[in-house]
Amino acid sequence: MPEDRLVIAGREFKSRLWVGTGKYKDFVETKKAIDTAGADVVTVAVRRVNITDRSKENLLDYLDPKKYTILPNTAGCYTVEDALRYARLARAAGVSDLVKLEVIGDERTLFPDTAGLIEAARILVKEGFIVLPYTNDDPVVAKKLVDIGCPAVMPLAAPIGSGLGIRNPYNLRIILETVKVPVIVDAGVGTASDATLAMEYGADAVLMNTAIAGARDPIAMAEAMKYAVEAGRLAYKAGRIPRKLYATASSPIEGML
Amino acid sequence: MNIQVNGEGRTANAGVTVAELLRELNIRPDRVAVEVNTEVLNRQEFERRGLCEGDRVEIISFIGGGRDYGVFDA
């Protein structure tokens, strides 16, 4: 099979399943889930170092930045200023210019504040960041983000951690037709079929955290998600048959008695 | 002198550098980013940058992410 690599801003990624690193019971489980999923992009959050208890281990002791693409996010930021601050700190922490930009607009839904997102993205792109924006399933906003220089967009399937799956497949399909950059479906995946559907629609990758970390058996779910994303991608490339209302016989009529 | 590190008051020797503060706290400089009074420092500045009375220092790193962890003060 020819290589089917995802390329964003000149960087090549081998897996189309990206995973978050939150909500696992410990770093050992985190790493096992990531490796089972086969993910090479992992998201991390930017937070204060615990200075009173230095016995705590560092996530990067488990996830070698040479082996994985560490994608810092600005999760928890509700203002443009906060998102910029976290992004700049993440870059200073020395991993890369990549940032998964989140400007959250509402605590209950964790939906993005798309006006703030566009404003923050514009500033960070000017500062040389590779901005991967977590956005709503809104084709107009996705297009604006691409126009200001985002090399990919990350529309949500459903609210973060909700497990509801793709709530608006039609908008997702319009986004896929509208933008000419990779589309990574981010947030809201509940189970393997959700990830497969996203890939069948033509998404370039899927990012998830809770669907794996919150499963009864996270490692088994990581494996399920790996196959789900691969199956969806293969089906998309193979080209599905059209939906028809009536039957079409598979066996020939000719030669019947 | 008194400084604030990650939101907590702390006494430090006058003119202590960021690099010295990190050593004192047993923190590897290659895994963190440091902000002094909301200005993000380049890692090369850690050895040079001396701290002053009342400085607010933030030392951050990457954690599993992840959401709904406490954000730090402005």
Image (spheres, rainbow, N blue to C red):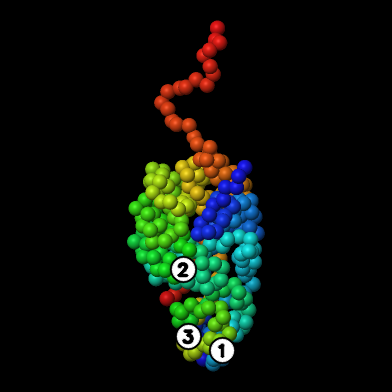
Residue drawn at point x = 59 percent, y = 52 percent:
A14
Mark 1, secondary structure of its residue: loop
Residue, disc 3: B55
Q: Assess whether mark 1 and mark 3 are in contact (beta carbons under 8 angstroms).
A: no
The amino acid marked with disc number 1 is Val
Quadrant that contains the C terminus of chain A: top right
Q: Is residue A140 left or right of residue B20?
A: left
Q: Residues within 10 Å of mark 1 (few under 14, many from 20)?
A: some
Query: Residue A48 at what x, y percent from top left?
Result: 52, 72
Residue, disc 1: B16
Asked if residue A152 is positioned above or below residue B63 in the image, the reply reads: above
Asked if residue A40 is positioned above or below residue B42 in the image, the reply reads: above
Quadrant that contains the N terminus of chain A: top right
Q: CA distance from mark 1 to mark 2?
A: 32 Å
Query: Residue A178 at what x, y percent from top left?
Result: 39, 49
Residue drawn at point x = 44 percent, y = 70 percent:
A127
Residue drawn at point x = 56 percent, y = 91 percent:
B13
Give the tally of numbered discs.
3
Mark 3, secondary structure of its residue: loop
Viewer-nearest of labels 1 and 2?
2
Q: Chain of mark 1?
A: B
Task: Kindly give the residue lying farthest to the top in the view shown.
Answer: A257
The amino acid marked with disc number 2 is Gly
Residue, disc 2: A128
The amino acid marked with disc number 3 is Asp
Query: Residue B4 at what x, y percent from top left?
Result: 49, 83
Say whether residue A192 is visible: no
Q: In which image quadrant can residue A94 be found?
A: bottom right
